[in-house]
Image (cartoon, rainbow, N blue to C red):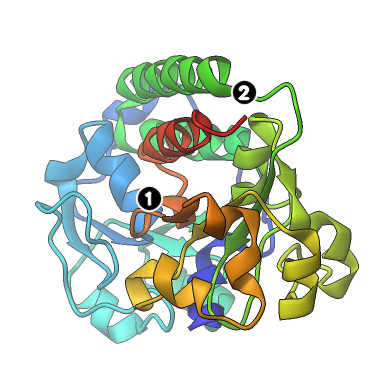
């Protein structure tokens, strides 16, 4: 479960060529787009390019109007993709044999946007900008970015803590977490929250260390965020773990289920993630 969850947030970064202006791109904008990235799917629809999207992968569940298909983002199949006759494919660089898939599509003269998961929010804005250029929606992309920046700024300014508040973000019930150097971790860092996983960063060179129950108990976080709530983990099940019932987060009812998907995506719903965190820390001294 964990490996699949982090797939789209911990992949190598590949530099994409700089695109020309939105005006220059408009005349050659794609009209048959296949998107094999849930985050990019959200971006495309948010900038008004949704009508050009003919198929998305099985995990692209937002917006609900997205044309979900059986195409697999994790193990993309060239023949299946080509059968749609696309003129642009959004392919994540962390997919199985991603480079060979990209080259195969190139041989078929199908344009590929080779997406890399961003390290921070600026990387998310960069992808929105590039998708805007590719689809002739450059102005809409910049408008979306401005709205996101404004909303996120308001959330951070309204709730950022001056005193230390410790948090634990749980990816799955084997206690994998995220440090402040990851995309997710930087959201918490923006609110000046103390991430207990940071001290265990050396346990994993990618920023996703596996913590021990004893370590979490000793760290005694004030807030616990459950990214695995969709798999059945809850405040009550956390409280039943040996030694966890006395944690500050448990005794103060600050074990929170994160909205499904939102923390693992870097599209327009990042705003929702920031707003959720802002609201969750409002009652913590």
Q: Which residue is mark 2?
A: 160
Q: CA distance from mark 1 to mark 2?
A: 29 Å
> For the point 37% across and 50% down, which residue is it?
40
Q: Quadrant of the C terminus?
A: top right
Q: Which mark is residue 40?
A: 1
- The secondary structure type at the circle numbered 1 is helix
Is 188 placed left or right of 254 in the picture? right
Q: Is residue 243 visible?
A: yes
Using the image, determine if residue 108 lies above or below residue 55: below
Identify the residue at horizontal 66%, vertical 31% (top origin): 190
Q: Position of residue 208 (x, y in %)?
A: 71, 67
Residue 224 visible, this orientation: no
Give the answer, above or below, for where 277 lies relative to 88: above
Q: Does residue 210 sit above or below 197 in this rendering?
A: below
Front disc: 1 or 2? 2
Helix, strand or loop at label 2? It is loop
Left/right placement of residue 44 relative to residue 194 reads left
Q: Residue 93 placed where, x, y %?
A: 56, 66
Q: Earlier in the sequence, mark 1 or mark 2?
A: 1
Q: Picture quarter containing residue 123?
A: top right
Q: Left or right: 67 with respect to 126?
A: left
Q: Residue at x 16, y 67 (%)?
A: 68
How packed mark 1 is, by other alpha carbons closer than 10 Å (few <14, some 14-19, many 20 or more), is many
């Amino acid at each position: 479960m964990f490996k699949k969850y982090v797939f789209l947030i911990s992949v190598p970064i590949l530099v994409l060529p700089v695109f020309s202006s939105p005006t220059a791109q408009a005349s050659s904008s794609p009209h048959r787009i296949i998107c094999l990235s849930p985050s990019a799917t959200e971006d495309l629809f948010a900038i008004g390019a949704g009508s050009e999207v003919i198929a998305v992968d099985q995990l692209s569940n937002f917006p609900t109007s997205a044309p979900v298909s059986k195409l697999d983002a994790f193990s993309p199949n060239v023949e299946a993709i080509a059968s749609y006759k696309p003129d642009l494919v959004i392919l994540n660089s962390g997919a199985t044999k991603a480079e060979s898939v990209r080259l195969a599509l190139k041989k078929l003269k199908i344009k590929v946007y080779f997406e890399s998961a961003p390290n921070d929010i600026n990387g998310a804005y960069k992808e929105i900008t590039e998708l805007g250029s590719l689809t002739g929606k450059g102005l809409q992309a910049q408008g979306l970015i401005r709205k996101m920046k404004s909303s996120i700024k308001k959330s951070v300014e309204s709730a950022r803590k001056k005193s230390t508040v410790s948090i634990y973000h749980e990816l799955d019930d084997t206690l994998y977490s995220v440090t402040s150097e990851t995309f997710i971790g930087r959201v918490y860092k923006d609110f000046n929250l103390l991430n207990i996983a940071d001290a265990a960063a050396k346990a994993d060179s990618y920023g996703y260390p596996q913590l021990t129950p004893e370590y979490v108990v000793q760290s005694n976080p004030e807030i616990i965020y459950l990214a695995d709530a969709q798999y059945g983990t809850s405040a009550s099940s956390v409280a039943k773990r040996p030694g966890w019932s006395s944690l500050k987060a448990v005794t103060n009812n600050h074990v929170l289920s994160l909205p499904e998907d939102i923390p693992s995506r870097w599209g327009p719903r990042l705003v929702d993630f920031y707003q959720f965190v802002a609201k969750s820390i409002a009652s913590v001294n």
